[in-house]
Image (cartoon, grey):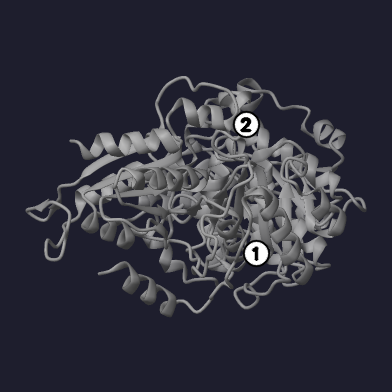
Amino acid sequence: MPWSLYLMIFKNKFNIVVGAVTEIEQGKAKANLDVFSSTLQNLAEHDRDIIVVTSDSRGSGKLAPFGEKFPEQIVEVGIAEQNLIGVAAGLASCGKKVFAVSPACFLTARALEQIKNDVAYSDNPVKVIGISAGVSYGALGTTHHSLHDFAVLRAINNIIVVAPADNFETEQAIKLAAKTDQPIYLRFGKKPMPLLKEVNDDVFEFGKGRIITEGNHVAIIATGETVYPALQAAKKLKEQNIAATVISMHTIKPLDTRLLKMAAEKCKAIVTVEEHSIYGGLGEACASWLLQNVFNKEGSESPSFGGVWGGLFKIIAIPDEYTVTGSQQDIFNHYGINEKGIAEQVTKLLKK
Amino acid sequence: MKYIFHANAGHTGGSLSCIDILNVLYNHVMNVSPENFKSPDRDRYIQSKGHSVEALFVVLADKGFYPESDLNTLCKYNSHYIGHPTRKVNGVEQNTGALGHGLPISVGTALAAKLDNRKFRVFTLLGDGELPEGSNWEAALTASHYKLDNLCAIIDHNKLQITGPTAEVCNTEPIDAKFESFGWAVRHLDGHDLNELKETFDGLPFAAGKPNLVIAHTVKGKGVSYMENVIKWHHGVPDEKQYQEALSELDNAMVTIPDDF
């Protein structure tokens, strides 16, 4: 199926059409965290059931203005992440639209049992918000990194796992999360993120990846704050006559396997990029699906045999080692999660 | 007892220590029934010591949430009546089983009532053995910080846990002074004295603006002589002879509650 047809079906199926966002200069790029905070304030303006629960994290979560404006809608529990999630679950069980906000590193490790039992298993639709995710707190060391969150949450039933890439995806994800009655985990960082598309009429839906740019040689499937460097790499590859598709796979679970399949049928190589351990994240989710499913050779430009996808595959992520420290960008550069590193991995893969 | 015997599994001792408390809560104290279970104003019960689920299941059946015969499937393949409370069972508020979870969830639920100016109350039952879980103390702080006098935690203080006497495993005494210093109003009672249970719960809230704690002194395995205060009955299952003996003792101990209780 051609991309345009996919997009058409996609748009027709869901009638929440987001207005075009135009001409946002990169200099005006905001951190996804700031967009989260302002979106939440807009929502709370019209909905008294929106409740933020924080663990001394209103400063790092840019929620101080929210607290000042809506003192009745913010619950502070102090530095106590397990309690944060338990309290959030209790509030959600009474119909509150609860955003439980704390750094991703603590929330998805220390409070993991509460996320598993009180939120996912008990089906209390808490919006678990992991701020300063991945290596956003790069210089603070492993205690403050969350490179395990996709892996552990993917293995827990009944929770949507989302890493928005840019301000557009963040705003849409927060708005949608407020309306969703299923538990959800959203994670993002604090660095300003340029918009992936200058003109954008994409429909945002959990479990439906976004095609940012199209090409037939390689599909770069990235998530969160690595989609932008993936897009930069695609531009660089174009100079070498390598046409790349770039997908923002903002939802890690449920994975958009339809889009993955289309990418696999169209391109002979797939590269995944994520701000996460090489284990258990987006890359392994894609690899697992590709290996266990059959492909229709008809109309396919990618090498298939016996129904099994025979393409080339590479995961770009944080390796399983004592993680280097520095700024988020320093760490990305160190591990090749940047324009140059991703482009190099693609050319290397295509030579195989 | 019957269902534990037939399931060949269960937490016998702890279910017998808390069943009197549950009977009084469901039949005298709480405004909850199959008819109002969807109402946002119903009282909530969240069982933190989820392993004593058999007591909850029989009380909910007795209350009319489902036919008691459903419990014949206890712990059987694909039954909703598993070894811990789940919301798949009509009348159960939250899925519990991991210890130290009930109090934080109850705090959030009681807080929701305060935010919405609703009058419902939240009851949660903790085992004394689960008090070392740090999340309890996190929640205890939050409860008094938000002045949740609509919250009542009950500790089933049977003084035994799987390894041995709770005081020897990890001494949590004095429980009352600890909670009082956390800003709670605390009462002690005999957890098998129906009148004392009734009168104490009728006195809620114990102090305006303070969360309530009832330390219920109970006997693990209450009502079955050979089980009382014997650790192996934490999750022991009786054999045929022991089972018949237990049934006979429990039948003899049965009291009829007057209509005006």
In percent of width and height, residue A251 lies at 45, 55
In percent of width and height, residue B171 lies at 69, 23
Q: How far is mark 2 from mark 1, CA to CA?
A: 64 Å
Look at mark 1 in the image and give the residue it sits on. Answer: B256
Q: Quadrant of the C terminus of chain B?
A: bottom right
- Identify the secondary structure beneath mark 2: loop
Q: Nearer the viewer, mark 2 or mark 1?
A: 2
In percent of width and height, residue A199 lies at 54, 65
Whether residue B54 is visible, yes or no, is no
Q: Nearer the viewer, residue B99 or B216?
A: B99
Q: Quadrant of residue A284?
A: top left
> Is residue B1 left or right of A132 when viewed as pictured?
left
- Residue B24 vs A272, above or below: the answer is below
Going by the numbered disc 1, the residue's amino acid type is Thr
Marks 2/1 in contact by CB < 8 Å: the verdict is no
Which residue is depicted at the point 64% across and 47% down? A85
Report the label total.
2
Look at mark 2 in the image and give the residue it sits on. Answer: A137
Which residue is depicted at the point 36% across and 76% down? A9
Task: Single out the residue that lies furthest toward the right.
Answer: B208
Q: Quadrant of residue A46?
A: bottom right
